Amino acid sequence: MTMDRSQGRVQRPANDAAPVATASGHRGLVLEEALIFEQGQVGRTGVDLPEPTAMLSRLGGLDRQGAIGLPGLAEPQVVRHFTRLSQKNYGIDSGFFPLGSCTMKHNPRLNEKMARLPGFGDIHPLQPESTVQGALALIHELAHWLTTLTGMPAVALSPAAGAHGEFCGMAAIRAALAARGDVRRRVLVPESAHGTNPATAAALGYEVDPIPATARGRVDLAAFKAKLGSDVAATMITNPNTCGLFEDEIQEIAHLIHGAGGFFYCDGANFNAIVGRVRPADLGVDAMHINLHKTFSTPHGGGGPGSGPVVLSADLAPYAPLPMVVLEGDRYRVVETADGSAAATFGRLKAFHGQMGMFVRALAYMKSHGADGLRQVATDAVLNANYVLARLKGRLTASFDGPTMHEALFDDRFLKDTGVSTLDFAKALIDEGFHPMTMYFPLVVHGAMLIEPTETESKEAIDQFCDTVLSLAERAASEADAFHASPRLTPRRRLDETQAARKPTLRWTPPALPAAAE
Ligand SMILES: *Cc1c(COP(=O)(O)O)cnc(C)c1O
C-alpha cells in the first residue's frame, strides 16, 4: 500500500480482498494463543527441585487434599505465552493513540529510569521517616511544582486517579460546608462533563443538576444563573471542557457560584492544554484535580496506575486528607493523625501516601522540561490539535466553529446518508493501523469523534493519520459494506462490546474430567 501525500489519498492494491482463512488459525506472524490453563499438562514443569527432606508439616491436618489445579508448563512455553500476550497489547509505544480526553502522550524513558532508582523503587511506605527523607523531599518538591503551576496554596497528593481526586476535592467541599453548618443538596454539572463528575457528586450524596451547553459548546450562563440557589454546594466544571474548548466565561461562573455561597470544583484533567499559561487560582477555582498520568506523562491505561493530586484553596486546605508530608526545620515528617494542623481533615483516602512511582515520573517530567518547557507543552498540544482540525474540517464536520484547545471534536453529520456510523468508521481505522479516536463522547454532539494528538506526535505521524481519516471519509459512501464488516484484519472482528462490558467472562472453568474407570 502506498501513501500519495500530494493527493492526501491512500492507493490500495487491486487485490485487497477479504482476509484469507488459514489452516492453523494463525495469521501472518500473529498467533492465536490459548489460555495458559488450556496449555498446561499435569506433571509438566519448568523446574527440577530436589525432594524436600524431613519437613515437618505444621498445617495441623489442613493440608490440601485435591490437586492444586495450576497449569504445568515448561519455561519456554511460559515465556512464549506472556510474550505473545504482551504483543497483543496496543499502547502508546506501538503507535498513534488519538483518544480524546485521555491524553495518550509519550512516556519519556528518563522518567522510568528515575522511578527505578533504588532510593525510590525499593523503599516501603512503613519504613521509618529517617530512612526515606529523600523520597519525602521528592513528594514535597512535587507539591511545590503543582501549587506553583496552579497558583493554589495547598495540594493533597494521595488520590490514585482523576476520579479519586474528584472525590477528594468534593469531600473537602462537603466538609467545609458541614463545618459552617451549611448542608447543601445540589451540585451543578454541565451536560458535556466527563461521566466521573456526576458520579462523584452522587457518590457524596448530592443531587446532580445538569447545565445545558450553548451552541458554542460552552456552559449556558443564563441556565447556570437560573439554577443557582442557596442549596447548591458546588459546580463541577471542566476547563478546557470536554469539547476541547476554553470556557471563556469561567471567571463569571466562579464569581456567581461564590456569590451563592457554593464552591467551584474544576475538573483539571485537561490541564495539559493550559499548563504554564493559565493559573487556575486566577480563574477562581477552589479545588481541582490534576491527572499526573495525562498532563505530566506518567504511563496509564494498561501501562500503569493513575495519580490524581488535588490542589485546594486556603478555605479547603484544612480538610485535606491524611497523610500529609510537612517540612519541619530540615526534616520531613508525615502527618498521620487528625490533630494539630490536621485536626479538621475529612479522613483518609488511601492506605499510604499515593502513587509514589508516578510522583517520581511526574517530577522527572517537570524538571526535564523546566517552566518554559511546560509552557511549550501546552502550546504544542494546542497547535497539534488545531492542525488536525484544519486538515480534517473540510471533509469531516467540526462540531463548533473556531479554533480548539488540545483536542478536536467532530460529529457524524459528514456520514449522513452513507449508512456508515461513527462506530463503523472507528472500526475501519483499526484495519488501517490506527487506534480509534474517542467515540460518542462528549454526549452533547451526535456520533462524536474526539481526537487528541498531544504534543508528542510528529507532523509526519499526524499527517499519516489525517491522510487515512480523509481517505476513509471519501470511501464511506461507496464502501459502506466494508465499513460494516470492519475490522477485517484483526484476530477478532466485531465483538459484542455491551455483552463484554456487562457480563465479562473472567473465570476459566476447567472442562469436566472424564469419569474415572473402576
Ligand atoms: C480522564 C478524565 C477524568 C478521570 O480521570 P481518571 O484518572 O480516569 O479517573 C475526569 N475528567 C476528565 C475531563 C477526564 O478527561
Image: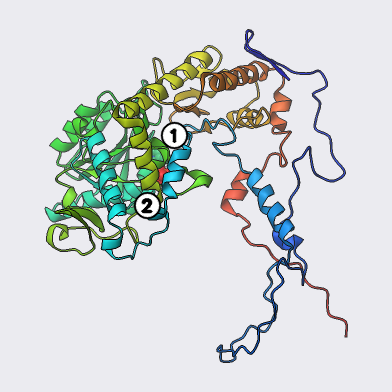
- Ligand 1 quadrant? top left
Q: Earlier in the sequence, mark 1 or mark 2?
A: 1
Seen in the picture, residue 488 relative to 69 is either above or below; the reply is above
From the image, which quarter does the C terminus lie in?
bottom right
Q: Would residue 199 be seen by someone viewing this image from the given angle?
A: no
Toward the viewer: 65 or 227?
Answer: 65
Q: Residues within 10 Å of mark 2 (few under 14, many from 20)?
A: many
Label 1 vs label 2, nearer the camera: 2
Q: Secondary structure at mark 2?
A: helix
Residue lying at 20% horizontally and 39% vertically, measured from the top left: 152
Side of 50 relative to 448 (left or right)? right
Q: Nearer the viewer, residue 128 or 475?
A: 128
Percent from the top left, x then y, of residue 125? 35, 62
Image position, residue 53 (x, y; %) = 65, 86
- Residue at numbered disc 2: 356
Report whether the residue tagged 1 is closer than 8 Å to ligand 1: yes
Depth order, front residue of 104/438: 104
Q: Note whether residue 325 is visible.
A: yes
Q: Which residue is mark 1?
A: 101
- Asked whether 78 or 437 is in front, the reply is 78
Q: Position of residue 16 (x, y in %)?
A: 79, 23
Three-letter amino acid code of the residue under disc 1: Ser
Along the horizontal axis of the image, is 58 left or right of 33? left
Residue 383 located left or right of residue 20: left
Tell me the amino acid under the disc marked 2. Met
Answer above or below: position of 146 versus 52.
Answer: above
Q: Quadrant of residue 210?
A: top left
